[in-house]
Amino acid sequence: MSTKGKVVGIISNLVTVAVDGPVMQNEICYIIMSDVKLMAEIIRIGENNAYIQVFESTRGLKIGTEVEFTGHMLEATLGPGILSKNFDGLQHDLDKMGGTFLQKGDYTPALENDKLWEFKPLAKPGDEVVPGSWLGEVKENWMPHKIMVPFSFTGTFTVKEVSTDGEYKINDTIAVIADEEGNEINVSMVQKWPVKIPIKAYKEKPRPFDFMETGIRVIDSLNPIVEGGTGFIPGPFGTGKTVLQHALSKQAEADMIIVAACGERANEVVEIFAEFPELDDPRTGRKLMERTTIIANTSNMPVAAREASVYTAMTIAEYYRSMGLKVLLLADSTSRWAQALREMSNRMEELPGPDAFPMDLPAIISNFYARAGYVHLSNDETGSVTFIGTVSPAGGNLKEPVTEATKKAARCFYALSQNRADSKRYPAIEAVDSYSKYIEYPEFIEFMKKNVSADWVDNILLAKNVLIRGREAYEQINILGDDGVPIDYHQILWKSEVIDFVILQQDAFDKVDASTPIKRQRYMMNKVLDVYKTEFKFDSFEEVNPYYKKIINVFKQMNYSEFHSDKFKKFEDELQEVIKERAVLEN
Amino acid sequence: METTAFQKIHTKIDQITKATCSLRATGVGNEEMATVDNRLAQVVKIQGDLVTLQIFSGTEGIPTNAEVVFLGHAPRLAVSEELSGRFFNAYGQPIDGGPEIDGDLVEIGGPSVNPVRRKQPSELIATGIAGIDLNNTLVTGQKIPFFADPDQPFNEVMAMVALRAKADKIILGGMGITNDDYLFFKNTFENAGAIDRIISFVNTTEDPPVERLLVPDMALTAAEYFAEKNQNVLVLLTDMTLFADALSIVSNRMDQIPSKDSMPGSLYSDLAKLYEKAVQFPDGGSITIIAVTTLSGGDITHAIPDNTGYITEGQLFLRKDTDIGKVVIDPFRSLSRLKQLVIGKKTREDHPQVMNTAIRLYADAANAKTKIENGFDLTDYDKRTIEFAKEYSEKLLAIDINIEIDTMIDTGWTLFNKYFSDAETGIKSELIEKYGKRKSE
């Protein structure tokens, strides 16, 4: 007999319920209104009352309304059919909902119960398995979707039976396994997992080291992120956070992309809905939508489900990681989630921390980032969840609580700068202030030496140094005037501008320039550093600016041309000519 | 008011604060409307049988034995074709002396559009103002505010944009506007012969501030009614800063802990719920929102413009250009995020390049001006940019411009050719060949 209750208090979407039996923190319940059921979660328990946050508007709710408790926490439904879906924050399938408007209590199932999947067994009778072990696989779009021993099981099991090749529905039994006492358990293709709890069905979680290519030069060539790494992008509005996230979701070298649109504009999600089914994934030639799942809780959707949406997304990411896949999870924006926490903490009359955010905000954020990572699975395969979140700092001030808490948790920091955005230097990532902690990892340095280039990390440090010196020169020139400084200062400034214009700036709307493969990045970085290392001769400072503008212009034309095409080579030759004009030859 | 025989009348109020009163009652729904001593009120909190009502017009003079009647529904608006050409107060009651609206009663602040049912906005809105059409093109289904200081002519510009936008309906939501401004809108729309396309919900400075909270939802509920009939609806919301101020008054009276700038912690969600009503429906109807957010001393880091900027699809800044003595749309700080969807696609292909080049040259002029201020010498190029900037301001940025988009682009080319070489503009040679050829050289 499940616990029931009655509504005794209502303040906005915080509802107090008098309960008649045991309830659990974070348990899901439904408020039974005359025409509709409203989903809610317990967020505090006291005396005989449960305090629940309702994932919907409570308009019209009355005292005395009945509440049914489900006995479980908020769970994600995990099985084939998640890819290419558009879910809301609670994993309801948005496409299955009727009507133009989201109706209260229209809860659609995440997966299709009747769809047939082509199953292929991977385990055989007698095999020893643990939670997360692969029993078989189905093709989901082009991806091998592993059917696993449910994560909620504990201990070691013996496989008794596995279904043969054939078509099955998700709820069909595809394997029978026995626990240590010999109790046989049927396993289907679908399992459930509470979203707030990390899935730990892996052997170990080493430090990540494997470079993840994004095609974005200011990231790959200056602040690289690794597979299983964490990063965050803070930036005031209008600095291009969303354009950057979209670029990442289109280009990043990952098997699966999960986009959690958390409390942001609906039209931005619509852009993904409109474009992804059309755009090609350069790695597989398939449509981008085939490797993408969208969790949309836009800013006008229920606030309480915002927090749930990022956890739902992370749980799905961990599920696919357990299949040995590289998953990239993007959340835009984690600030909206923090604000949702603030609204609720406020209604519960908790003592506030800085800017009225709950005191445990830093702990919540760092626990969440910690769920990303690179893992060794029980069968020694590897998988990863890379997490990049955006932060929308209030007033563009990076000292606000969400940014500060995130800075402690994430290993890569991509600072978007208002100044760069104002002068249309996109992507507006401030390369010098941004950082990647991974370039300090010996494992990563080793990996890059072996797989990309021997001097990759050295070049990063050199390029950053040039940029810092350029910035200093710029300040000097501003104070002392163009003719108040030696010509060398102008050269230092313009050599850093070459890096800025050629490497850092990238046209997200140009077909060629939008994504730069790592080989091409290496090539261009070397070219640019060659310019830096070359000594040029000038008679007056007035010659410096037009000359470097010429160099930059030719470089930009190269950026817009297909790599190693005739056009590219033509501009490359032109560049050599321009360099010769003023280069001081050493011999 | 709407009293019927079945409604129970309560006459014992337990507690009265500045904005709320509490009484014992049962069977009351959350957010239900009521009347207290004939003033409209709404349920904001229920604790057991203790119901707290927020009285929109304040509690001055409310006695403990006031008559309280629960109306059994959330705030709602009667919608029908009859709305056209009418003026209403924040409760949706006519204030123009005309009859009550005969139509379906719809609860305001209704559900959001399912994001998968939205269509990507793609229809350009032409306003004739080059600072908007050329540099910050508007699209149906967009939401965009003017960020303006209180002394700037934002209401005039907004009225002009509204009248030129060729919308099927224009819905004005006035919050805390002065009576003078209200009459300005009324006269402007009447003189333009557009009154039958206009619907106004107005709360002036003479009305209680908390009533303002209903205005945007009223306006947007009316907008949804027409947009669902495949009409293009333009909603004007002025001034959203005063709306947000009313939110902070309420949250303060409800003993909530304020966050940044004494605004409620839910400010972002409260604003987003309204602005996200802007939508392009698949069947052709649309809701476009143009709002005004007044700034104090141009500070956009204040919580109200800051949260607004994160929600809206760009913002428009007005600035007084001392070179030409006119108000212009500031090309640097203004932004339309949706312009990418139409420029060079619905407009001529050279539009994006001409726009960007002109702004870049205008930025060079700004640098040159800084040089003058710092006492450095100007190069010949610097001098030309300054001349260019003045003419660009005069012929394109000023808000009194009213020309076709093609003319704007052609004007851009004329200015480039007058002041700069092709190398200095750096525009793709194919485009110069096609659109920007110099005459008689």
Image (cartoon, coloured by chain):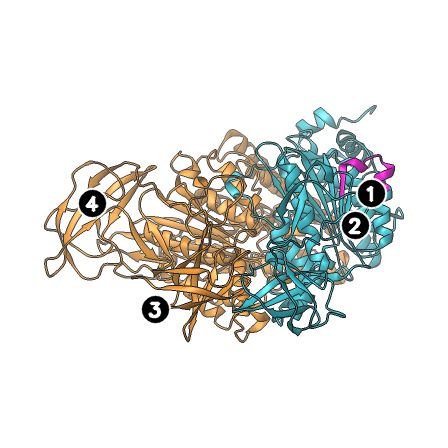
Chain colours: A orange, B cyan
Q: Amino acid at mark 2?
A: Leu
Q: Secondary structure at mark 4?
A: loop
- Residue bearing mark 1: B399
Q: Which residues are magenta?
A: B188-199
Q: Is residue A552 above or below residue A278?
A: below
Q: Position of residue A259 (x, y in %)?
A: 46, 48
Asked if residue A570 can be seen in this view, the reply is: yes
Query: Is residue A63 toward the left or the right of residue B167 in the image?
Result: left
Q: Position of residue A570 (x, y in %)?
A: 55, 32
- Residue bearing mark 3: A21
Q: Quick one: label 4 or label 3, which is nearer the N terminus?
A: 3
Q: Is disc 1 in contact with disc 2, using a CB cutoff of under 8 Å?
A: yes
Q: Position of residue A211 (x, y in %)?
A: 39, 52
Query: Is residue B156 toward the left or the right of residue A60 in the image?
Result: right
Same chain for labels 3 and 2? Say yes or no: no
User: What separation in Å lies between label 4 and label 3 (alpha carbons)?
Assistant: 34 Å
Residue A173 circle label: 4
Q: Is disc 3 in contact with disc 1, using a CB cutoff of under 8 Å?
A: no
Of discs 4 and 3, which sits in the foreground?
3
- Residue bearing mark 2: B318
